[in-house]
Amino acid sequence: MITEWGRRNLKVVLEPIAGIFRALHVTPNVITLLGFLLNVVAAYLIIIGQVTWGGVVFLIAAGADAIDGTLARQIGIRNKFGAFWDSTLDRLSESIIIMAIAYGYAVNGDAMAVMIAFLALIASFLVSYTRARGEGIGIDVKVGVGTRVERFIIMAIALVFNGLYEHILLIGLSLIVILAGITVVQRMWVVYKVTHEIR
């Protein structure tokens, strides 16, 4: 998956930056919070119509999200609250970005686009839920073509290049609906196969 590729190839960049935060005694949880706050700023910029700049801040926030995990591995921290905190703020960040986009469509009276935004939000949440629920019954469910990294890439492209093509945000949301929806079905199928093999 793209996630694994990123971890391997971006390590040379992320490790030194994480080392700086380590020297400053900044904890991974603080960096996670910083990433969330940057996403709040990105959402605000989208709401006021500065979509491209919102995309730029969205990219910066993603950097913070990548660094917190790298820093945690450097320090050797593996606590359950950190994982919970990171996942929760990830969902909140994704939600407020899609909410901001939906707000723009709502102001312009585009009901269909608002519906697609909500579908993207629902599908994204279901991707996380199916994995968490699968792990809750002892099944590792990490498969899928629309994990958070893929959704982030689509969203980043749609936001940053919004000024070049007016329908790119709607296309991006539609892609997220499709890929996240496929991922949900993939994960449901994995759980179905494993549970029936057990039986």
Image (cartoon, helix red, strand yellow):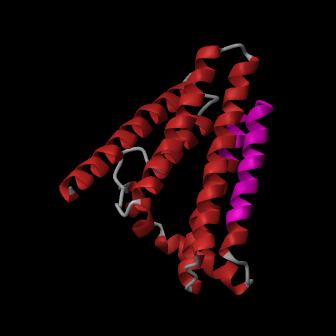
Q: Which residues are magenta?
A: 32-56
Tell me if 33 is positioned left or right of 154 in this view: right
* Residue closer to the observer: 185 or 27: 185
Q: Is residue 37 magenta?
A: yes
Prevailing SS of the magenta stretch: helix
Is 62 within the magenta?
Answer: no
Please report the residue visible at 62 percent of the width from the left and 37 percent of the height from the top: 159
**Residue displayed at 73% across by 27% down:** 103
The answer to whether residue 169 of the structure is visible from this angle is no
Quadrant containing the C terminus is bottom left
Query: Of residues 189 and 93, which is closer to you in this image?
Result: 189
Residue 12: x %, y % from top left: 48, 74
Within the image, what quadrant is residue 15 found in? bottom right
| Residue at screen point 54% across, 43% down | 125
Check the image and report above or below for 124 versus 47. Answer: below
Query: Would you place residue 165 above or below residue 27 in this image?
Result: above
State the image coordinates of residue 190 (x, y, percent, origin top left): 28, 50
Please tell me whether residue 32 is drawn above or below residue 51 in the rendered image: below
Q: Position of residue 176 (x, y in %)?
A: 48, 36
Looking at the image, which residue is at 58% across and 78% down?
Answer: 79
**Residue 59 shows up from this direction:** yes
Residue found at the far front of this picture: 199
Q: Does residue 186 appear left or right of residue 157 in this picture?
A: left
Number of dots carrying numbers: 0
- The residue nearer to you, when weighing 20 against 198, is 198
Question: On the image, which quarter does residue 76 sit in?
Answer: bottom right
Left or right, 148 with respect to 137, comes to: right
Quadrant of the image containing the N terminus: bottom left
Q: Position of residue 9 (x, y in %)?
A: 42, 67
